[in-house]
């Protein structure tokens, strides 16, 4: 690689974490986010960098455009997805979780809400709320007028706030509830489990038609408790519950649960708490196609630059 090529690669590497973080929040999958970043690298490598005044802004514009295009295609495919569609879980660093705003912006619960936005609204929301770009900078990144960006930002923010109230539960409390949940479900302690669950708790399970999961959300504390009691007593994809290992680790900016058995990751599970610390939502990803990042133990830094 020439000196110029090495310099270009260095510049790209400096911004790679930001680019992946943006793309993942817009797309909801690590695989597609990595592809979007790779597309950006190809375009960056082939462009005349002497005409690029601000490399960071240029790269953000490329990834934003690629991610929105990919999201439009993905949304059409998801219309025929078997059962509930959930984002792809990723292992995150503790540093990301130490920042409440950063942890929230990559949480499974928020990513689910972002799925209901248009590609433009989602990109604008991510760039504005997660990364603090100005409306003018976002307008340049998404190739829209500043007024259009302001309107999209307002619609997205209102939509998210209506569907995702922010409950700032501290990390110690989150981990405590997660560990108590594991103990109650694996130990068959339904009384404790019912105390942990909010009355209107909802469980989403994503098997993608690859593995057996609930085809619709399971709603209500009694039904969710019964669902977990049932799976605790039967084998899962040929793996007996007694042969499964359960790990509490950092998933999407907070404590999460990884189930491992027969030499593979079987599923992940994250809990969302309400303002009283009870579990209001459970997201269970079991589609093998979505467990690659966790299975390979790829750890992502998803904070700002």
Image (cartoon, rainbow, N blue to C red):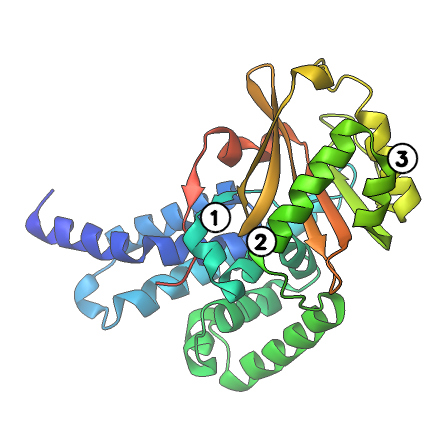
Instruction: Decide if residue 302 is in sight here.
Output: no
The residue sitting at 53% across, 52% down in the picture is 253
243, 19: nearer the viewer: 243
Of the 4 image quadrants, the one containing the C terminus is bottom left
Residue 196 in view here: yes
Q: Residue under circle 3?
A: 226
In the depicted view, which residue is nearer to us: 272 or 59?
272
Q: CA distance from mark 2 to mark 1?
A: 30 Å
Check the image and report above or below for 37 versus 122: above
In percent of width and height, residue 103 lies at: 53, 58
* Image quarter (top left, top right, bottom left or bottom right) of the N terminus: top left
Q: Secondary structure at mark 2?
A: helix
Determine the CA span between mark 3 and mark 2: 27 Å
In the rendered image, residue 9, in percent from the top left (x then y), is placed at 21, 50
Q: Residue at x 58, y 46 (%)?
A: 255
Q: Which quadrant of the view contains residue 275?
A: bottom right
Horizontal and vertical percent for residue 133?
Answer: 43, 75
In what element is the residue under mark 1?
A: helix
Which quadrant holds residue 257? top right
User: Residue 222, image x and y in percent?
Assistant: 92, 43
Q: Considering only order in the chain, which callout, 2 or 3, is on the residue closer to the N terminus?
A: 2
Residue visible at 46% across and 62% down in the picture: 64
Position of 59 with respect to 256 (left or right) is left
Tell which tag, 3 or 2, sits nearer the viewer: 2
Mark 3: secondary structure = helix
The answer to whether residue 261 is above or below residue 23 is above
Residue at numbered disc 2: 172
Residue assigned mark 1: 33
Residue 243 vs residue 111, the one in the foreground: 243
Q: Are marks 2 and 1 in contact (CB under 8 Å)?
A: no
Up/down of 240 relative to 111, above or below: above
């Amino acid at each position: 690689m020439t000196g110029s090529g090495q310099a270009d690669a260095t510049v790209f590497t400096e911004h790679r974490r930001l680019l992946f973080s943006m793309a993942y929040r817009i797309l909801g999958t690590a695989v597609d986010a990595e592809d979007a970043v790779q597309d950006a690298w190809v375009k960056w490598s082939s462009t005349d960098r002497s005409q690029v005044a601000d490399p960071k802004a240029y790269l953000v514009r490329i990834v934003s455009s690629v991610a929105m295009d990919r999201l439009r295609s993905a949304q059409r495919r998801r219309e025929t997805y078997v059962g509930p569609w959930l984002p792809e879980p990723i292992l995150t660093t503790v540093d990301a979780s130490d920042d409440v705003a950063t942890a929230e912006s990559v949480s499974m619960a928020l990513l689910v809400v972002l799925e209901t936005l248009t590609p433009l609204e989602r990109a604008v929301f991510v760039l504005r709320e997660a990364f603090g770009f100005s409306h003018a900078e976002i307008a340049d990144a998404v190739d829209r007028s500043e007024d259009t960006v302001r309107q999209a930002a307002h619609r997205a923010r209102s939509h998210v706030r209506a569907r995702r109230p922010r409950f700032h539960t501290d990390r110690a409390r989150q981990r405590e509830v997660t560990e108590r949940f594991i103990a109650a479900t694996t130990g068959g302690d339904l009384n404790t489990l019912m105390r942990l669950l909010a009355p209107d708790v909802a469980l989403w399970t994503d098997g993608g038609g690859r593995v057996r999961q609930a085809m619709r959300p399971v709603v209500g504390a009694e039904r969710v408790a019964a669902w977990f009691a049932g799976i605790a007593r039967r084998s899962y994809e040929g793996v007996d519950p007694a042969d499964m290992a359960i790990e509490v680790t950092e998933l999407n900016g907070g404590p999460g649960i990884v189930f491992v058995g027969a030499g593979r990751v079987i599923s992940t599970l994250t809990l969302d708490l309400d303002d009283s610390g009870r579990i209001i939502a459970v997201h269970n990803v079991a589609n093998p196609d979505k467990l690659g990042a966790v299975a390979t133990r790829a750890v992502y830094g998803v904070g700002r630059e």
